Amino acid sequence: MDPLFGHGIDLTIVLIVIGKTLATFVVLLLGVLLLIWYERKLISDMQNRIGPNRAGPYGILQTLADGIKLFFKEDLLPEQADRRVFRLAPYLSAVPAFAAFAVIPLGGSVSIAGHRTFLQLADPPVGVLFLLAMSSIAVYGTMLAGWSSGSKYPLLGGVRASAQAISYEGAMSLAIAAAVLIAGTLSTHGIVADQAGKGYLRGLLPKWNLFTVGVVPVVIYVIAATAEINRPPFDLVEADSELVGGFHTEYSSVRFALFYLAEFMNTITVSAVAITLFFGGPNGPEILGLGGWSGFLWFLIKEILFLSVYVWIRATLPRFRYDQLMDLGWKRLIPVALYWLLLIAALRVGQDQGWNAALVIGIGIGAGALAWGLLGLAARTGAEQAAEDALGLGEVRA
Amino acid sequence: MDWAVFVVAGIATLVGALGVVTCRNPVHSALMLVMTLFGIAVLFVEQDAHFLAAVQVIVYAGAVVVLFLFVIMLLGVETNEDLHKDPLRGQRPAAIALGLLMLLEVLLLVRSNWVTGAPSTAGAARSADQTNVEVLSRSLFTRYLLPFEATSVLLLIAVVGAVVLARRPTRAELADINEDDPDLVTAE
């Protein structure tokens, strides 16, 4: 629990909470503003271009200029559109993106107006589940935008959005469950607190969940979360070379800006969640003279590194094909994530019961190899049968 | 404070529930259902059942209704069904009668001492040193372990059943069907 609410609630505390809400919102919006500029600049560098360089120093105000331009564009409403849902969809996209960011610990605890408080808007006891809930309802925005446009390409984008979100949610949840299993709590603050302290190899490596869970869930989380927020290489939902603009083809002006905003807010939130769960959140050596605020600086540094990786991925990888997307999600990520979760659980139980760790790992690897072999056999048989059916179907019909 | 939250969430739940049955467009109905589910989730939070609230949103709003919408989108909603013709004769009066009976039952229960106002009848939803998730998981994995495992087996059976039903028939099976009833294959 946040120490802020420990001694009853008075006006100062209400004001602090309102201030924190506004500050979080402003941080996120500023982050989006800078991220869009940063992404365009970095991609330009990777592609040997200059990128935005007109508005402000190094083109840093380019996003602001684009935003203002979008506000003065005509707001179109297609004739075939389902008006109410069409108007509602952009907000359904933007609100979960912001709400999810509320449970991210941005720093350690600081003093504001004589009250100790966490640098975190909210710390619900089910923080991680709240994140999952927000990510699972974020799909409504994309899906309904596609459906309500009353046109074919957006509809295809919307259908893809729902299938993709449901497929990758499983793998993402299982990867997150690994971190929850280690920390033994669902509160985001608790998970960060659990990662503090002396690390591995005599303190050479920090005690981050990245090492505690054994890297694999982290990789799975990053892949699944990228698919979940429809960023390249998983942007099949808007796939401009196949679907014109996908779900937001018919959108213009402020509503389009909201989708754009939501997409980048999601990118920031997903990186922040990865940092919180696996990279120690705002933990780090205290920087001199900053006290409780040095955590925020560490968080920013980690966030920028993470976002750079996302931009790098976007600049490097081509878009997945739809069948590749489904194969990766269902046949690779979910089995591996499930197996790894069971392995971690077995090790935890072994620790409590005093089993031989080497034996547990040995049996675990053996069982994993067996399961992988069986799964491969099943997949091959299925594929063979499907191919045979495809060949033989005409014959039988005739 | 609790009262205000209850009233707002209750109104959202009821308006959503009425919307589900009165909206003419199936997509609007599904969205109203989401509103109802959210209202109920807020009521769960108010009763200290944080875990239940989160799971309600993740499973029902995040997966079940998304699948509803997926199916509606794939099948299309252009077909205007005639709402004045009952597919089952006498369905409407029966539904109204059963609904009234249900309402009467709820009202009777409210008057009896079944409703105590306590958040939970199976012990406190949380204690000083244990969060709701801890209390819930402890009772789920000790006292209610057998029902819990039975439920998971039931779900497994449902998954296997769904796969069997959705599976394409193999070539050999198709040939069998072909012999028995040639129309069936050509219809496919």
Image (cartoon, coloured by chain):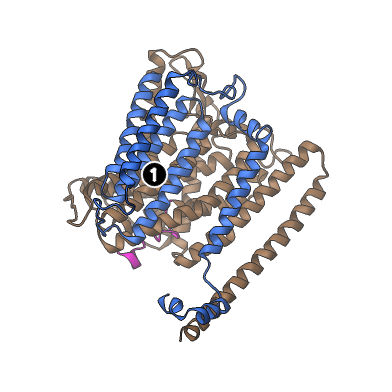
Asked where in the image residue B16 lies, by quadrant, the reply is: top left
Query: Total label count?
Result: 1
Residue at the spot x=44%, y=60% of the render? A315
Q: Which percent across, then down, holds residue A64?
A: 27, 44
Q: Is residue A57 visible?
A: no
Residue at the spot x=78%, y=53% of the render? A363
Prevalent SS, magenta region: loop
Q: Amino acid at mark 1?
A: Met
Asked where in the image residue B62 lies, by quadrant, the reply is: top left
Chain rendered blue: B
Residue B10 vs A306, above or below: the answer is above
Residue at the spot x=40%, y=36% of the render? B38
**Closer to the camera, A132 or B113?**
B113
Chain rendered brown: A
Asked where in the image residue A276 lies, by quadrant, the reply is: top right
A130 falls in the magenta region: no
Q: Which percent across, then down, holds residue B147?
A: 64, 39
Magenta range: A229-245
Identify the residue position indicated by label 1 in the image: A265
Q: Is residue B5 left or right of residue B175?
A: left
